[in-house]
Amino acid sequence: MDVNTNSVLALARTPEGKKMIRYSMVSVVSVAVSQIVLFTTYTVGRLASAVMCNFIACTVATVPSYYLNRTWAWGKSGKSHLWREVVPFWALAFLGLGFSLWAVDYAESHAHHFTHNHFWTGIIVNAASLSAFGVLWVGKFVIFNKVLFVHHPENLPEALDGRTGLPT
């Protein structure tokens, strides 16, 4: 596959390319929120275990992620449908959370092989969380784009037009 500047710019100008850019920007916001909350609660505040602090961080970051993805990245408006948008989005978020919880637990459990300093353990935990969500990032884009926030032609019945999320 030949990737050059002109082809990347051409893709960025398409509706699909613009959606990818907006999804990426939402991900940057979500990652920043999650990493800051995790670092603050685990490394600085030492409030709980890495697993519990990661749970808090992911939960906090998922709220703006949902609204930014729905409204800005995919251009959806109106009320969110609980079973067609909210529940599937949070299910994907918790799938990512499960993978991330395993990663931070593993990192916290094995960090003592590299350091006995809590600050550096915190850095390792943050890196594990970031890596876990990075692996899932592409898959989530495909699911959001092809299933969750799909726009369908206007001549379909409301239940299938994409404004309400998944078809019934």
Image: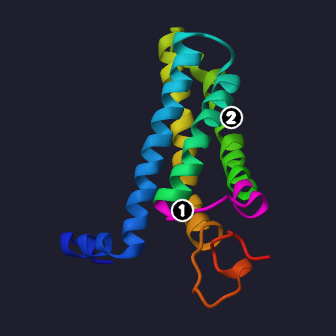
Residue occupying the point 60% across, 30% down: 57
Q: Which amino acid does the dot numbered 1 rest on?
A: Phe
Colour approach in the figure:
rainbow
The stretch of residues the image draws in magenta is: 73-86
Element on which disc 1 rests: helix
Q: Name the residue under label 1.
A: 141
Q: In this view, does 13 lie above or below 155?
A: above
In space, the residues marked 1 and 2 are separated at their CA atoms by 21 Å
Q: Name the residue under label 2.
A: 101
Element on which disc 2 rests: helix
Residue occupying the point 63% across, 30% down: 104
Which percent across, then down, holds residue 155? 62, 91
Q: Which amino acid does the dot numbered 2 rest on?
A: Leu
User: Disc 1 or 2, which lies upstream in sequence?
Assistant: 2
Residue occupying the point 67% across, 58% down: 80
Assess whether mark 2 and mark 1 are in contact (beta carbons under 8 angstroms).
no
